Amino acid sequence: MKKTKKINPLVMERFHYSTEQLIDKPFNWKQLYRLLDYLKPYSKNLLPASIITVLITTAIRLIIPILIGVHALDKAINTQKNIPYLMWIVGIIAVLYVINYVANIYRIKWSNELGQRVIYDLRKHLFTHVQGLSHRFFDQRSAGSILVRVMNDTNSLQDLFTNGVINVFMDMLMLFGVIIILFTLSPQLTLAVLVILPLMFLISTTLRKTIRRAWQYMRLKQSKLNSHLNESIQGIRVTQSFTQEQENMAFFDGVNTENYEAWRNATKKSAMFRPLVDLTNAVGTAVLLWYGAHLIQAGSLSLGTFVSFAFYIGMFWEPISRLGQLYNQLLMAMASSERIFEYLDERPIVHEKNNAIELEDIAGHIQFDRVEFSYDDKRKALKGVSLEMLPGQTIALVGHTGSGKSTIANLITRFYDPTAGAVKIDGHDLQDVNLKSLRHQISVVLQDTFIFSGTIMENIRFGNPMASDEQVKAAAEAIGANRFIEQLPMGYDTEVEERGNILSVGERQLLSFARALLADPRIIILDEATASIDTETEVQIQRALQTLLKGRTSIIIAHRLSTIRDADKIFVLQQGEIIEEGNHDQLMVHRGEYYRLIEAQFKVMKAI
């Protein structure tokens, strides 16, 4: 009998612990107005067109019960027995229904288009804003949770903008018109029927907070579910390698269950609103029949007026019911909008000045002047680092993990700003320069390179979208990537699929080199870029780099010290400080930390 693998109870309980929190705020009217601001671009076309159709359909619906009860029943039948007048009224009603039909078609068409355009604008605004945020924002959030904000949370606002905004205007207009007509027809009967309303509003007010929090909690759980799903798909190879499928399924089942329970709780609480309106409607109808019959017997109300009154009472509860549903929809939208605006209110920690300097053709002279930096405001990643990289030099940064090598690269590209000191390029403090013009001068190649879905040609051209096919091929040939590209089924037009799964690690790295070189930067940063490449490919790349990096400032970060022997200068870092500097030969003679690192790697290679 096969033994069932026991699931670690700590893993099963893992989903109970989350750093996410509910945004516990009262209903924010300013936030609602902020949402409605997205309607402004359409205030001269789709919005007024939709409102006009609403006015037409509402006016027709308010007129028809008067024509049926007062004119058709009371005047044409009961009082005058005037058949021609009755037929004329019937003709008018038929024409009004045709107009109402046409107006409703355009109302639905224009309001849906309005809603879709607003959602398009909102999602575009959110995505554009997120792209401009600093690296720290992405360090603190999973890709799945960001995906939920951009897709799911904006989708949840779709009903509000496609139907909600126009419908609430229509329902409020209908409600206002019906109340005026009801009091005009019979004030006594109106007061009797509507006596139940204060109780309904009292109960609905008590439901408001609990419904809103329930939907907000559901959005939080949905975000957690999507985040875990994204993480699981990206890490499926690791999961299978360590045979952790059961633990992962147990975790997913827990998150999925929480999401389901949160949804069920929210819908259960929201479902209480509609029956409340229906109950009020039933009580109102009973009062109408009882008190209306009494007024007819007393001679203070005609039969036709009573029929019209009954029509209007039905029309009164209809918008009340829809407004109740809209209120639930609004609570859902507020829960999502809070999460969307939480991101939109995020500001990049790297700020660009209004009068920022545009960097054009730089020489590539880099200076660090007593630079300090901390990622968490607690432990310093750099401690008063001062260094200089002359134009055209090849600089190497070496040291143990966490010594500050990648931090220096992050400060040069200005993904972060130093907490003290200054980083300068050609004498310009990077905090004074335009970000786009700075990064246009720099290409970065990472160890974990990212390949986009698309063709080989498109991935290389990402470094310079304006490059011709010949330039793309020239960059690939210069780096030696053309050898494997030309062996692919469709060459440069081969689809590489998501994250370049059809390519080996070394091939993906070669593509990233070609992409960086096509950008023709003045500064190139190689952050462990050759760590995943075999020795033969590495030799090929080193030969290409000797020519391609000539005249450019290049920073090479590497644990594999054989790749930096020819560097003009090597900086050895330890715990955020530079402890040695010089070229390979000078540092070997010095017999310090660099010498020990080389010796340790030599022993490892010899043992292999």
Image: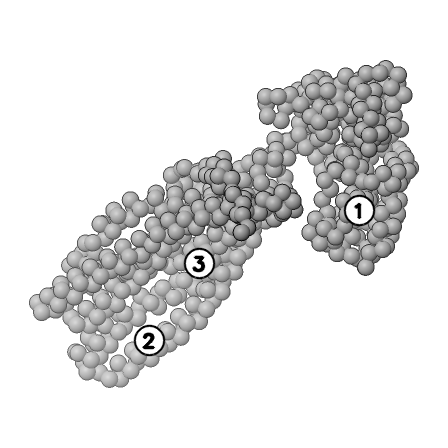
Mark 2, Cα crowd under 10 Å, few <14 / some 14-19 / many 20+, is some
Specify whether residue 543 is in view.
Answer: yes
Residue 385 appears left or right of 66: right
Residue 44 in the image: state x and y as whole percent. Answer: 51, 56
Q: Amino acid at mark 3?
A: Asn
Residue 57 in the image: state x and y as whole percent. Answer: 38, 66
Residue 400 in the image: state x and y as whole percent. Answer: 73, 25
Residue closer to the observer: 492 or 415? 492
Tag 3 and tag 2, C-beta contact below 8 Å: no
**Residue that label 3 marks:** 163
Label 1: element kind: helix
Tag 1 and tag 2, C-beta contact below 8 Å: no
**Residue that label 2 marks:** 93
Choose the circle earlier in sequence order: 3 or 1.
3
Label 2: element kind: helix
Residue 204 in the image: state x and y as whole percent. Answer: 29, 48
Residue 193 appears left or right of 336: left
Q: Amino acid at mark 1?
A: Glu
Label 3 to label 1, Cα distance in Å? 51 Å
Q: Residue at x 39, y 62 (%)?
A: 55
**Residue that label 1 marks:** 507
Task: Find residue 557 and report its image quarter.
Answer: top right
Q: Amino acid at mark 2?
A: Ile
Residue 30 appears left or right of 60: right
Please tell me whether mark 3 or mark 2 is closer to you in this view: 3
Q: Is residue 207 above or below residue 551?
A: below
Label 3: element kind: helix
Q: Residue at x 23, y 57 (%)?
A: 280
